[in-house]
């Protein structure tokens, strides 16, 4: 193997740039020619490929987003799209590929690998919803962004003695809501994996106010429903006038935390080591108990990864 490629795909996540940097520099360290494929699988289908040198990835370790840019490609999801993608890899002389992205991207990578190219997936999504790994690149930054925002909202919540609902991202998983809610001391955390009814939210709210609480923070994961709908219910049921903040895409951007930079550097570098030492098949880099490991990509892509339920229980005990 002499030439390897790297691409980022799906929703961007802080730390993707640090992972690209690690792939490029470890690849060059081992004597490979490294190319970057722009705009994920969409760019692969368009043949949008550039040579990357040591200096191409200078000054990016601290930057959010992805310098290779990213996309969600519907064409790549088709059989014809994957055949074309494979043909483009062969035509470009790419003999091994590192795919940095979330679960959908790594499922696509697993399918592409079956056509005959070694691929290593690097899990990167703010949602932390990927099986086999304790953490995905971007999650730590996203929860820190959410906690900073909730802390600010708490200032105004205490001043006005109000209830605030903060809707966070996470697609169908509650990782962000549970981690940010626990760290920010939320009174209630609403997640798709352990749904509570609007009435239960109201009863918890009322119990708190009866005990003397003068404000309340409710964190809702987008997959559990709309913060605005919960607000309407609370308004009708309790007479409170909740305020709603949807944090949205600010959770996806921003400079990665030190933890995400370190994780991305370790995972990106290990992805190249895997191509170097085990040139064949498809694998995913993961971290478990602090150790960087590899797993068969086919076995983990598409599998659920739920949060530790004890964290949710702890948040409820501490918000009593
Ligand atoms: O997967 C990351 C994520 O930000 C999810 O939390 C969110 O549901 C989704 O992407 C939004 O996707 P899009 O970028 O297509 O709007």
Image (cartoon, rainbow, N blue to C red):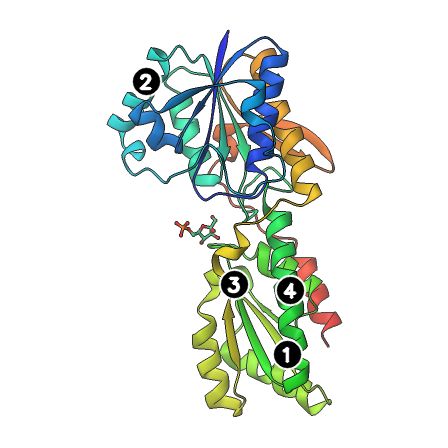
> Compared with residue 71, is residue 86 higher up or lower down, i.e. above or below?
above
Q: Is residue 12 visible?
A: yes
Q: Is mark 3 within 8 Å of ligand 1?
A: no
Instruction: Return the x and y of residue 72 as percentages of the image width and height.
Output: 36, 40
Q: Is mark 2 within 8 Å of ligand 1?
A: no
- Look at mark 1 in the image and give the residue it sits on: 156
Along the viewing direction, whichever of 53 and 264 lies nearer the viewer: 53
SS under mark 4 = helix
Q: Circle 3 is placed at which residue position?
A: 247
Q: Earlier in the sequence, mark 2 or mark 4?
A: 2
Mark number, residue 290:
none
Residue at the image point whose x is 47% and y is 77% from the top: 230
Asked if one can make out residue 284 in the rendered structure from this viewpoint, the answer is no
Q: Position of residue 270 (x, y in %)?
A: 63, 23
Cα–Cα span, label 4 and label 3: 13 Å
Residue at which label 2 appears: 88
Residue 293 or residue 261, whichever sits in front: 261
Q: Which residue is mark 4?
A: 181
């Amino acid at each position: 193997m002499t030439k390897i490629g790297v691409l980022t795909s799906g929703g961007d996540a802080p730390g993707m740039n640090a992972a690209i940097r690690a792939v490029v520099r470890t690849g060059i360290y081992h004597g490979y020619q490294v190319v970057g494929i722009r705009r994920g699988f969409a760019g692969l289908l368009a043949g949008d490929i550039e040579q990357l040198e040591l200096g191409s990835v200078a000054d990016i370790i601290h930057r959010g987003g992805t310098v290779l840019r990213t996309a969600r490609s519907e064409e790549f999801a088709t059989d014809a799209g994957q055949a074309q993608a494979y043909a483009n890899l062969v035509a470009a002389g790419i003999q091994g590929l590192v795919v940095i992205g979330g679960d959908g991207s790594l499922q696509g990578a697993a399918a592409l690998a079956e056509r005959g190219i070694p691929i290593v997936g690097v899990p990167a999504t703010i949602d932390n919803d990927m099986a086999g790994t304790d953490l995905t690149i971007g999650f730590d930054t996203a929860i820190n962004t959410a906690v900073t925002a909730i802390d600010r909202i708490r200032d105004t919540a205490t001043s006005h003695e109000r209830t605030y609902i903060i809707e966070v991202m996470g697609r169908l998983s509650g990782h962000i809501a549970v981690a940010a809610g626990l760290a920010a001391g939320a009174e209630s955390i609403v997640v798709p994996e352990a749904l509570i009814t609007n009435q239960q939210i109201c009863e918890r709210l009322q119990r708190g106010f009866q005990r003397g609480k003068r404000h309340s923070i409710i964190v809702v994961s987008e997959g559990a429903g709309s913060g605005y709908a919960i607000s309407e219910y609370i308004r009708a049921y309790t007479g409170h006038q909740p305020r709603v903040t949807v944090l949205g895409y600010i959770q996806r951007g921003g400079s990665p935390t030190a933890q995400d930079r370190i994780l991305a550097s370790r995972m990106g570098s290990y992805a190249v080591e895997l191509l170097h030492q085990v040139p064949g098949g498809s694998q995913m880099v993961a971290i478990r108990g602090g150790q960087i490991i590899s797993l068969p990509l086919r076995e983990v892509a598409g599998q659920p990864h739920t949060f530790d339920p004890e964290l949710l229980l702890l948040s409820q005990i501490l918000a009593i």
